Image: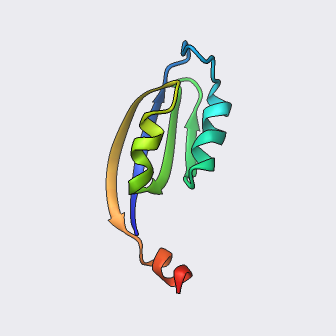
Amino acid sequence: MWMSNIYIMINSRNSDQNTLRDLCSAVSETGATVVAVDEQSNLIEAAIPSHDVPDISAMEGVSYVRCVFSYLSTAAFARAA
């Protein structure tokens, strides 16, 4: 399975008024692992299956998603077997 490490920039003035904690929970529910949260910069770092990146980009309150790097995870194949 292809995985991506991403940075998610949060717009604190979003129309749904989602907080950073709300968005961290929503990101985790997509199957991502939240690696770090920078509250001062409104930034979430996460590792996520690459095919779920567009779902994160479409979330209300997300202003920008940057894919830092992608890699093939063999651990996902081992769990599936």
- Taking depth in this image into account, of 66 and 2 the one nearest to the observer is 2
**On screen, 78 above or below 5?**
below
**On screen, 80 above or below 1?**
below
Task: Farthest residue to the bottom: give it.
Answer: 81
Q: Which residue sits at x=60%, y=34%?
A: 23
Locate residue 24, reporting x and y percent.
62, 39
Q: Which residue sits at x=65%, y=24%?
A: 19
Locate residue 81, reporting x and y percent.
53, 87
Q: How is the image coloured?
A: rainbow
**On screen, 11 above or below 23?**
above
Total numbered badges shown on the rendered structure: 0
Q: Is residue 74 left or right of residue 36?
A: left
Displayed quadrant of residue 36: top right
Q: Which residue sits at x=67%, y=32%?
A: 21
- Taking depth in this image into account, of 62 and 7 the one nearest to the observer is 62
- Taking depth in this image into account, of 56 and 5 the one nearest to the observer is 56
Locate residue 74, reporting x and y percent.
42, 78
Q: Which residue sits at x=40%, y=69%?
A: 1
